[in-house]
Image (tube, helix red, strand yellow):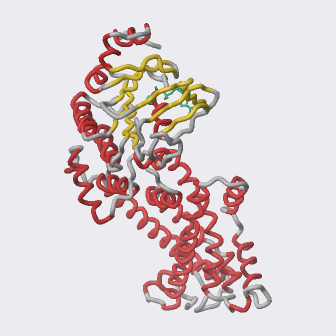
Amino acid sequence: MPESMSAWQLIASGDATLFAIVRLSLVVSLSAVAIAGFIGLPLGAILALTRFPGRSVLIVVINGFMGLPPVVVGLTVYLLLSRSGPLGALGLLFTPTAMIIAQSLLVLPIIAALTRQTIEDLWSEYGDELTAMGVGPSGRVVTLLWDGRFSLITAMLAGFGRAAAEVGTVMIVGGNIEGFTRTMTTAIALETSKGNLPLAMGLGLILISLILVINAAAWGVRVWSEQRTG
Amino acid sequence: MMRASLSDLPLVLDCVSFRAGGTTMLDRLSLTIGPGAPTLVVGPNGSGKTSLLRLCMGLDAPSEGAVSWGGRTNTPQTRRAILFQEPVMLRRSVAANIAYGLAQAGYPRARRAGRTEELLDRVGLLELAARPARRLSGGEQQRVALARALAREPEILLLDEPTASLDPAATRHFETIALMAAHSGTKIVMASHDLGQVRRLAGDVVFMVRGRILEQASAADFFDHPSTPEAAAFIRGDLVL
Ligand SMILES: Nc1ncnc2c1ncn2[C@@H]1O[C@H](COP(=O)(O)OP(=O)(O)O)[C@@H](O)[C@H]1O
Ligand SMILES: [Mg+2]
């Protein structure tokens, strides 16, 4: 990225490095949200609909983990993936895959906790009706996830916002390697430390714009589908 | 008995009490509900009608006593359906709500669409099939819920004050559909505190006050020879508390 240019000039000139950074940021954060949703939505629903010893403790822990410090998650994944770590043989450290894994862990508690709350509230409304229709445990999970879809989109967005905005995990497990693991947030951190504040600020504005666009799109989908299916 | 009957009837409550949260909602009820014309459960608010219907559905277990269906205490509830006073519409189209009920009743997927149409036609909602169910009026939602309950082809259909918030036209419409179901062999057990409705529909009457059954009689006997002062007052239209 030519340092003399502002972020807007970079966009206007179609700077390839900038677009690679934006693309990687989106791929990493959206993949992380997809994975965390794949696990967190059913996990939250099961947590809402079942009773077992230790359930309250688990709920408190997951709620607490919504505020996990990214650097701690990053460090943990770093230790797991480092050459001497238990998963070191996979050779994933300082790759986008490692960043996706770390961000998934960061986002999972957010999606699971918000899903748990949403599904538990829905169950208090639907419980009798579904029980009377003889809906079994897996049917309840599926039904309530689907009927909670409008609120759950918001939970997914909260997760995406967290992933897209954080710098700690991607810096530690990705290493901010130019052209390979550099994301918007690590680029901002780097440009800031180099004193290139206009570029850093411009990148920050691009990041915020992207997050807004994705939220607006999700909102549009929500309104559209709510109008169609109530 | 030669062999176990597969019917859910008669539905028998044997000295059943139900308590929750320190309140006794039902107090030593004994009741037998057999096939035939609708049984109307009548009584003032808070007399325990809803609690009774929930026990009849098997949604709650009695604190004391036993509920049995066709002589069995732990039948699956596949032959029963309940229409709650405030039914819950799934966040889908009207047709999808019915199809959901059919799926839960194990109705073959290939025939669900056709059956959904039949059911919606029966409750007069065919033209609303594609609408989001939650956007319907109260009376329309009540009919969707009725169609969804009928989708189970229940032997016993429990209705909890289904017309309490409906206007006369919607009430008449609902009653007509319910009577059609009764004529085709479904046993209707319906809570109501509307005496006119009881006269229109009831084969027999269960009269409840404060968690107890004060009277169980044929509709004619109940109205002509009430045997308790409370029932007599209720029929006169006096306030029974
Ligand atoms: N979950 C509950 N916990 C405690 N009391 C309840 C509960 N549900 C209902 N009740 C009480 O039980 C009594 C019977 O209620 P219900 O069966 O709903 O009567 P009805 O349907 O005839 O109006 C009422 O006094 C009511 O306040
Ligand atoms: Mg009631």
Q: Is residue B115 above or below residue A39?
A: above
Q: Position of residue B171 (x, y in %)?
A: 26, 31
Report the image quarter containing ligand 2. top left
Residue at (43, 85) in percent of width and height: A12
Q: Position of residue A173 (x, y in %)?
A: 69, 83
- In the image, farthest residue toward the front: B2
Q: Is residue B138 above or below residue A26?
A: above
Residue B179 sits in quarter: top left
Front residue of A109/A210: it is: A109
Residue at (59, 91) in percent of width and height: A180
Q: In the image, A40: left or right of A78?
A: left
Residue A227 visible in rendering: no
Q: Is residue A165 above or below residue B181?
A: below
Residue A184 visible in rendering: yes
Q: Position of residue B106 (x, y in %)?
A: 38, 58
Q: In the image, A81: left or right of B23?
A: right
Residue A160 sits in quarter: bottom right
